[in-house]
Image (cartoon, rainbow, N blue to C red):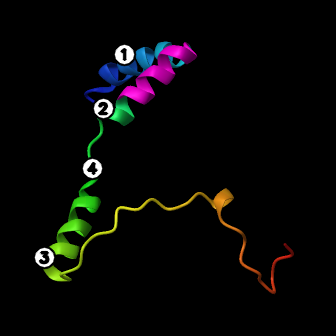
Amino acid sequence: MADFDKYVSCQTLVNEAYSDPLRWARMCVMNISASGKFSSDRTIEEYARDIWDVTPNYDGIPSPSEQPLAPSADVDV
């Protein structure tokens, strides 16, 4: 609880930023665009190369709207 006052001060700044949708959206986009690869991405890439001796595939996964639903006995399509 020693840093509670700092937490409250910071939360006040967050609340102010969030109350301005354009500012909040810009901050979100800047945050996302500045993020690097996740460490799990790097780890899987290293496993693929160094342990499994395969070439990683960087093709994107199509969105669900681009793929037809597979027929299923449990789902009416």
Q: Is residue 36 left or right of residue 18?
A: left
3 or 1: tag closer to the N-terminus: 1
Query: Front-most of 53 and 46?
Result: 53
User: In the rendered structure, which amino acid carries the disc numbered 2?
Assistant: Met
Q: Nearer the viewer, mark 2 or mark 1?
A: 1
Q: Position of residue 39 (x, y in %)?
A: 24, 56
Dominant SS type (magenta): helix
2 or 1: tag closer to the N-terminus: 2
Segment colored magenta: 20-30
Q: Is residue 29 magenta-colored?
A: yes
1 or 4: tag closer to the N-terminus: 1
The disc at residue 75 is none
The disc at residue 50 is 3
Query: Front-most of 65 and 1?
Result: 65
Residue 27, placed above or below residue 43: above
Q: Categorize mark 4 by other alpha carbons within 10 Å: few (<14), some (14-19), many (20+).
A: few
User: In the rendered structure, which amino acid carries the disc numbered 1?
Assistant: Ser
Residue matched to label 2: 1
Give the SS element for disc 1.
helix
Residue matched to label 1: 9
Q: Is residue 24 left or right of residue 42?
A: right
Q: Categorize mark 1 by other alpha carbons within 10 Å: few (<14), some (14-19), many (20+).
A: few
Residue drawn at (28%, 61%) of the image = 40
Q: Position of residue 71 (x, y in %)?
A: 77, 81
Residue drawn at (55%, 60%) of the image = 62
User: In the rendered structure, which amino acid carries the disc numbered 3?
Assistant: Asp
